[in-house]
Image (cartoon, grey):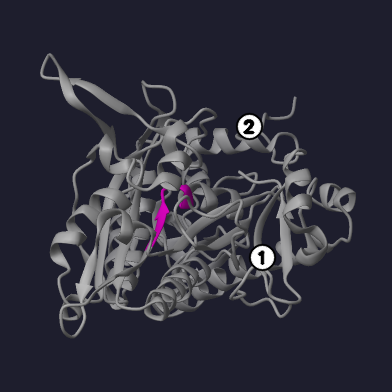
């Protein structure tokens, strides 16, 4: 009888494969309240590395980290009508505290535009206070009706940036900078996901924004995942909270603002972009453990050698872990590391020592080969970069192969059954977008004819990217 696969094959049931992988790679568990999740250490390690990479890019863009309360007076949300309307179905509202009914209900943070603007209005007085560039790492709560671990959860972790500028042009340029220099750079060059950068339609943009820039990734099943967004808020929140700065003389002007964020949804995107039937494949630049060195048997000489190799690789700047748990069968440990997607395994047993070699197993392209132990430290950096590039190339090739040009709504729906469609926005328009939505297909973004991000929805030659989405 054939041995049952560790994971449900992707081709049989992609959602079941996704859930199997999260469970068996020990990434997360469902929380006790519907829609919540417990992020396990290995899954949280992925998020920590994402945080580190993102935080460095955010700070390079000039923003500073701060923290604001998670409880927001309900009256704050009502100050910007479109914003409260957009979030009303997802709000969690606290009406009692300390055994008493609250005088004013408080909302558990769904996003922080309102509470941050309350303080921006105090902190901004003159043009010398601008630009004000703030970022926050926090949790948020949005009451999710159809939860899925990492992708849509009632509580999730994220960063949210909020800025105030003297002019519309400065705000627009900063939103674009975050979109490209922070988000796209990270997602393409670290996550290895070949995202498409575009502009959201009016139907899809953030509640209260005048423009939303998005990054869309194609997952292994051809669906789209919104990986992150950067919003131009115009002066909507500034007017609602009277956030102004003084010009020369007594005249005051409302600031122009942006907000932008990415979340633990990126962990789900990582899984669905790079995972295969054997488990996760973690990009080497992201991996907390790039190389695991395994002792095949509990031989003293083997144990000494794997620890020596670990020290040599660490000295070479490689993030390495030594697995000397020889009380656990080698086969089980190898399968566990395969599931977790560590890019490279170095396997050492008594026979390897005799020949001065180790078995090098590459998770991303697959395959094993013996390598001289003395050559590992010099070979591995190049191997890790090769495998990083391979993941990005595979992501790009999948998106290109499964994206087709279409000219009608029926053709767009057909394309979205297995991938993405590209259709003229001038031909589709808001009416066609609404018809697509009735069939579960959405316009993920609008791109210019040359693939760049357009400055306006109605720019001549704009193309709509349509897909089914998570």
Along the horizontal axis of the image, is 331 left or right of 94?
A: right
Does residue 98 show up?
yes
What's the residue at 59%, 48% (across, down)?
272
Above or below, 118 against 463 in this view is above
Along the horizontal axis of the image, is 106 left or right of 250?
A: right
Q: Which residue is mark 1?
A: 446
Along the horizontal axis of the image, is 397 left or right of 302?
A: right
Judge by depth and name the residue closer to the eye, 431 or 469: 431
Q: Residue 80, percent across and down?
A: 37, 48
Determine whether the residue tagged by mark 2 lies in a helix, strand or loop: helix
Judge by depth and name the residue closer to the eye, 210 or 299: 210
Which region of the structure is painted magenta? 259-266
Q: Residue 126, percent across and down?
A: 16, 76
Q: Residue 400, percent across and down?
A: 75, 66
Above or below, 125 against 222 in this view is below
- Magenta highlight: main SS: strand
Residue 382 lies in the magenta-colored region: no
Q: Which residue is mark 2?
A: 16
Within 10 angstroms of label 2, few (less than 14), some, or many (20 or more) residues?
A: some
């Amino acid at each position: 009888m054939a041995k049952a696969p560790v994971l449900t094959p992707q081709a049989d049931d992609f959602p079941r494969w996704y859930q199997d992988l999260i469970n068996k790679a020990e990434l997360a568990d469902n929380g006790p309240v519907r829609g919540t999740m417990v992020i396990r250490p290995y899954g949280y390690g992925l998020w920590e590395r994402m945080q580190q990479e993102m935080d460095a890019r955010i700070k390079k863009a000039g923003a500073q980290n701060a923290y604001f309360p998670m409880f927001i007076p309900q009256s704050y949300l009502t100050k910007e009508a479109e914003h409260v309307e957009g979030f009303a179905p997802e709000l969690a509202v606290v009406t009692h505290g300390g055994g008493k009914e609250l005088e004013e209900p408080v909302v558990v943070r769904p996003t922080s535009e309102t509470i941050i603007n309350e303080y921006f209005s105090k902190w901004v007085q003159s043009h010398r206070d601008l630009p004000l560039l703030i970022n926050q790492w926090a949790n948020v709560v949005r009451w999710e009706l159809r939860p899925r671990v990492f992708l849509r959860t009632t509580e999730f972790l994220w960063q949210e940036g909020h800025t105030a500028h003297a002019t519309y042009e400065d705000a627009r340029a900063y939103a674009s900078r975050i979109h490209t220099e922070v988000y796209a750079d990270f997602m393409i060059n670290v996550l290895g996901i070949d995202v498409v950068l575009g502009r959201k339609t009016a139907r899809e943009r953030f509640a209260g924004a005048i423009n939303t820039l998005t990054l869309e990734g194609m997952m292994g099943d051809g669906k789209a995942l919104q990986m992150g967004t950067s919003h131009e808020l115009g002066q909507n929140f500034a007017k609602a909270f009277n956030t102004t700065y003084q010009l020369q003389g007594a005249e005051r002007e409302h600031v122009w603002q942006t907000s932008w964020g990415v979340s633990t949804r990126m962990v789900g995107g990582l899984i669905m972009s790079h995972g295969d039937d054997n488990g996760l494949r973690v990009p080497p630049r992201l991996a907390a453990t790039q190389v695991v060195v395994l002792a095949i048997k509990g031989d003293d000489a083997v144990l000494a050698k794997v620890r020596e190799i670990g020290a040599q690789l660490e000295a070479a700047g490689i993030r390495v872990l030594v697995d000397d748990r020889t009380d656990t069968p080698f086969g089980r440990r190898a399968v566990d590391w395969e599931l977790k997607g560590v890019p490279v395994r170095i396997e050492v047993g008594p026979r390897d020592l005799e020949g001065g070699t180790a078995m090098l197993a590459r998770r991303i392209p697959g395959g094993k080969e013996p390598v001289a132990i003395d050559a590992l430290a010099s070979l591995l950096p190049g191997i890790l970069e090769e495998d990083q590039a391979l993941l990005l190339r595979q992501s790009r090739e999948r998106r290109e192969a499964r994206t087709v040009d279409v000219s009608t709504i029926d053709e767009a729906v057909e394309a979205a059954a297995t991938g993405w469609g590209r259709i003229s926005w001038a031909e589709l328009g808001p009416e066609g977008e609404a018809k697509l939505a009735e069939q579960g297909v959405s316009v993920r973004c609008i791109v210019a004819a040359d693939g760049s991000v357009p400055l306006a929805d109605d720019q001549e030659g704009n193309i709509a990217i349509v897909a089914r989405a998570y």
